[in-house]
Image (cartoon, grey):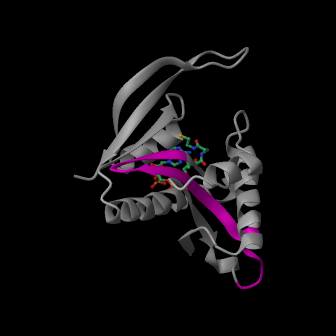
Amino acid sequence: MFAIEVLPTNAVELENVIQTVANIETMVQPDDAWNQRALTELLEQDSIRLLIAYDQAKEESVSHREIVVGYCLYQMTFEQAEVLRIGTDPKYQRKGIASQVLNKLHELLQLNQVESLLLEVRADNTAAIALYEQQAFNIIHKRKGYYKMPHKPVVDALVMKHTYI
Ligand SMILES: CC(C)(COP(=O)(O)OP(=O)(O)OC[C@H]1O[C@@H](n2cnc3c(N)ncnc32)[C@H](O)[C@@H]1OP(=O)(O)O)[C@@H](O)C(=O)NCCC(=O)NCCS
C-alpha cells in the first residue's frame, strides 16, 4: 500500500525526504537530475510544493527517508498549475504510484479552484506520455527540437494540459 502526502513540517524529516527525492531524480532523470539544493531552493517559493508517495508496508520499521518511493513537484499560480517534476523509484514503477500521486494532485488543485494543469514532456518519453494520456492530458503544443544534448539527436517537447472545468 502507498500513501500520498504533502511534505512533513519537521525540518530534519523534510531534509531527509528532499534528499531521497534528489536520489530518485538521479536514477530516473540521469541527464538532468535536480539536486537537493535546487529542490530546497524551489520549495522556498510559496507557489511550489511537493507531493510524496510513501511505501506504507515498510513504514513501521524504517524512517521516512528510506520509504519515499515517488514524488511530484508542482507549481500553482492562481487558476493555473504546472507539474515541474514527477518520478517513481525504478524498483516501484508500474505499481500505480505516479497515477495515485496525480490523482491526489488533481484533488488538491480542484480544492484550490485551479482550472488547468500543464506539463512538458519529451516526445520520446513513451512511459510518461502513456501515463499522462491515461490521466486525461491532451497535447496542446509541440516545441520543435526543444531538447538538445551534445552527441544526441534533438527531441521535441510536448506541452500537455489537463482541464478541470
Ligand atoms: C513516468 C513515471 C513517473 C511513471 O511512474 P509509475 O509510478 O511507474 O506509473 P504508474 O504505475 O502509475 O503507471 C500508470 C500508467 O502509465 C503508463 N506507463 C507507466 N510506465 C510505463 C512504461 N514503462 N511503459 C509504458 N507505459 C507506462 C501505463 O499506461 C501505466 O498503466 P498500466 O501500468 O496500467 O499499464 C516513471 O516511469 C518515471 O519515474 N519515469 C522517469 C521520470 C520521468 O520520465 N518523469 C516524467 C518527466 S515529464
Q: For the point 29% across and 50% down, which residue is it? A: 115
Q: For the point 76% across and 58% down, which residue is it? A: 19
Q: Nearer the viewer, residue 36 or 98?
A: 36
Q: Nearer the viewer, residue 65 or 80?
A: 80
- Tell me: residue 158, above or below residue 56: above
Q: Position of residue 113 (x, y in %)?
A: 30, 59
Q: Position of residue 125 (x, y in %)?
A: 54, 34
Report the side of 95 relative to 59 (left or right): left
**Quadrant in which the N terminus is drawn:** bottom right
Q: Nearer the viewer, residue 165 or 151?
A: 165
**Which residue is situated farthest in the left direction here?**
165
Give yes or no for residue 63 being in the magenta stretch: yes
Q: For the point 68% across and 17% down, which residue is it? A: 152
- Tell me: residue 8, above or below residue 106: below
Q: Main secondary structure of the magenta part?
A: strand
Give yes or no for residue 67 being in the magenta stretch: yes
Over which residues does the magenta segment extend?
Answer: 60-84
Q: Position of residue 38 (x, y in %)?
A: 71, 45
Q: For the point 65% across and 62% down, which residue is it? A: 69
**Which residue is situated farthest in the bottom direction here?**
60
Please tell me in which quadrant of the rendered image residue 146 appears: top right
Q: Position of residue 64 (x, y in %)?
A: 72, 73
Badge count: 0
Report the side of 59 relative to 103 (left or right): right
